[in-house]
Image (cartoon, rainbow, N blue to C red):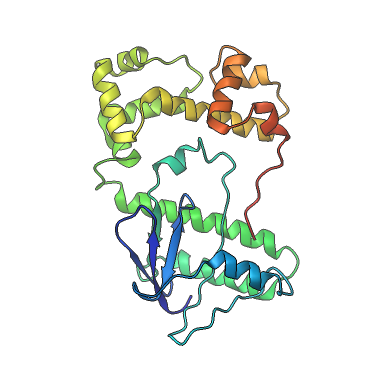
Amino acid sequence: MKGSCWLEVKGVKTSAQLSAGDFVVVTRGTEHTLRDTSTTPAVNFFEFFELVRSHASDGHSPYLIDGDGPITNLVCGGMVFENSAVDPLLAILPPVLHVKGNGGQQWLGLTAKYVSWELDHGGAGATEVVTRLADILFIQAVRNYFDENADSVESGWLAAARDPQVGRALKLLHERPQKPWTIASLANQLAISRSALAARFTTLVGEPPLRYLTRLRINAAVRRLRSTNEKLGAIAGEVGYRSVAAFVKSFKRQMGMTPGEFRRTPESKPPI
């Protein structure tokens, strides 16, 4: 909102300089550091945060970190994907999404100001409003990334979608994930060899076709488990598994729990 800083994300070689008006998402919650300069020692924010929060009157008050340098004001938040282990979107995004405020993105300034206003004024439904606005900011950041990189990336999901053969393979898997696909049947649809499809798909997407298909199926199952009361047998069949046992085994491997345990687990909520 004001000032500037440097963002360093673990595993990412280059630092990003953030300026007033910028919006940035660390897509997988990777450990990261914010500094005014590259030589400033970092302080563990979470230890400081717990200390301040224990003396705060409510959960929405600003936190001031004193210092003798220029003032930098940030609005920070987090969101949780309950099916992050299998969500196709998170798998294709880069570690950092950085939307620059001076890039002519009018939606960014307007939405950020609205978020800030709701946080400052509170009122009935403020938390729900801010949550929806955070969703919009994330969606717009993803859209911005797609728009800027669709024609230039040489690897990753965007390049895969643009590839004549792998793009068609992705379309088939997304349209009919319940079909009993094999490398052979998929390659036959595309009129290419199995080895060529497997190699090209893995190079561009980052994983073999059938592993990608498994995540698609489990992601679809997650949605049905949360939104319906369908029996496991029905869900298993709808997402492409011939037996409940095979579905449960695959689900537990991906999500770390059985479908029944997942259904009984309260929905994840983003931190305040």
Residue 147 spot, x, y in % from top left: 34, 51
Up/down of 222 relative to 71, above or below: above
Left or right of 53: which side holds 3? left
Q: Which residue is located at x 51 percent, y 19 percent?
A: 178
Up/down of 48 relative to 128, above or below: below
Q: Quadrant of residue 202?
A: top left
Can residue 22 be seen by looking at this rendering?
no
Residue 26 spot, x, y in % from top left: 45, 56
Q: Quadrant of residue 119?
A: bottom right
Q: Which residue is located at x 42 percent, y 26 percent?
A: 211
Left or right of 188: which side holds 51? right
Residue 9 spot, x, y in % from top left: 39, 58
Q: Nearer the viewer, residue 16 or 186?
A: 16
Q: Which residue is located at x 26 percent, y 46 percent?
A: 153
**In the displayed image of the protein, which residue is found farthest to the bottom?**
68
Q: Which residue is located at x 43 percent, y 64 percent?
A: 33
